[in-house]
Every structure is written in structure tokens, then in C-alpha cells.
Image (cartoon, helix red, strand yellow):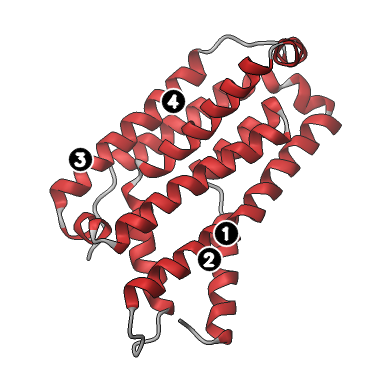
Amino acid sequence: MPDSHHLLLFVLAGWLLNLTPGPDVLYIVSHALRSGVRAGVVAGLGITGGCFVHIAAASVGVGALLATSATAFTLLKWLGAGYLLWMGLRMLLARAVDSSLEQKAEAASPERATQSLRQVFMGGFWTNVLNPKVAIFFLAFVPQFIAPGTDNKALAFVLLGVLFNLNAIPVNLAWALAAAWMARRLGAVQRGLQWLDRVAGAMFIGFGLKLAFSDRPAP
């Protein structure tokens, strides 16, 4: 494990990386704007769950396989790109629903609300799991903070990966709170919520195309 100075640098770097807008942030913000803080928090937890999958995979060598095997990387890359494109098209083609009516329907049917939150969680989970660059990011970023003389480097990798994920939770929560606050306070945002799915859908399609045409990072 790194000393206290390098551990602090690791935490700060993780926060800065999680503050950078990308598919994960867009997923959290779009759900928080449309459905409130709870949906945004659940979206963030789904993304965090996906990151834990990458940490576990990297610790047993799957991440290294993705970094060195063009075939494995390409296969997962196309799966991830296809998922992002599918999600973007679904959001683009979705019919606008009045948020107040939707909230009343969910309040009258707790089972429906729970199912909706489950879908939000799984959407964030798969958005992260099917992105091979997340696995390669952990392989490239985390080992820089493992001391060369560490006896059990695999354990150190897992512990730092878990710390990175736990540190991401308050950042994701902040994104959800900020987006929900904007939706409540700004009338312009509320009036524009019917266009949110279209804008977010177009951005997800853009992220999917960017992933589809990206090259495997050099090992």
C-alpha cells in the first residue's frame, strides 16, 4: 500500500477523474433531472457496482487480457458500443411523459417505482461493465500507487480499487443532488425536461460511436 502522501494523491486524483463529464456522469445527471435525487443516487450506485466488476476482473487477469488481446478488447468494445447506441436510440425515441403524472403513478404503485429504480441501477451497471476502457483504466491507473516492494500486489490492487470506488460515491451523489436541485429551482430546466431524453440519447449515441471507433490502448 502507498504511504499517506501517495494515498492522499490517489484519493484526490480519483475525485478529479470522477468529476470529469462522461457517460457515467451523463447517466446520473439525466436520471436525477428527470426523476429526482433517488433515481440519480441509484444510477450512481449502479455505475459503482459495474466498477467493482472491473476491479475483480483485473485482479484475476481479465483486465490484462483485454489490454493485450486485440480480439478480446474488440469484442467487449463492440458489446459496449452497441449497448450505448441502443440506450441512446431508446431515449431518442421515447415519448415525452409529464413528470408530475409519472410521479403520481409511481406513488400509487410502489412496486412499479421499485422496478423502475431497479432498471436505473442495472442500466448504470451495464453501461460500466461493457466498457473495456474502464478495465484498462484500472490497470493503468491503480498500479502507479502500489509500492514496488509490496509483497501482495494483487491484494493492494483490490484494496486501492475498492477505495477508488468508495471515493466515487460522494462525487456521484453530488452530481445527483446538483441535477435534482436544478430541476426543482430552475423553471427553464423543468420546461426543458421533455427534451432531456433526446439530448441525452444523442450524447449516448455519440459516446457509443466514439467507443466503437476507438483503438485499443497500447499495453
> In whole angstroms, how far apart are the C-alphas of marks 4 and 3?
19 Å
In this picture, residue 12 sits left or right of residue 90: right
In this picture, residue 144 sits left or right of residue 47: left
Q: Is residue 182 above or below residue 85?
A: below
The answer to whether the residues at label 2 and label 1 have Cβ atoms under 8 Å apart is yes
In this picture, residue 110 sits left or right of residue 164: right
User: Which residue matches tag 2?
Assistant: 163
> In whole angstroms, how far apart are the C-alphas of marks 2 and 1?
5 Å
Disc 1 marks a residue whose amino acid type is Leu
Helix, strand or loop status at disc 1:
helix
Whichever of callouts 1 and 4 sits on the residue coming sooner in the sequence is 4
- At x 71%, y 22%, the residue is 192
Helix, strand or loop status at disc 3:
helix
Disc 4 marks a residue whose amino acid type is Met
User: Which residue matches tag 1?
Assistant: 166
Depth check: give the residue in front, 150 or 79. Answer: 150
User: Which residue matches tag 4?
Assistant: 87
Whichever of callouts 4 and 2 sits on the residue coming sooner in the sequence is 4
Helix, strand or loop status at disc 4:
helix
Whichever of callouts 4 and 3 sits on the residue coming sooner in the sequence is 3
Give the number of marks.
4
Disc 2 marks a residue whose amino acid type is Leu
Q: Nearer the viewer, mark 4 or mark 2?
A: 2
> In whole angstroms, how far apart are the C-alphas of marks 2 and 3?
29 Å
Residue 157 in the image: x percent, y percent? 39, 70
**Label 1 crowd bin: few (<14), some (14–19), many (20+), radius 10 Å:** some
Whichever of callouts 3 and 1 sits on the residue coming sooner in the sequence is 3
- At x 46%, y 39%, the residue is 125
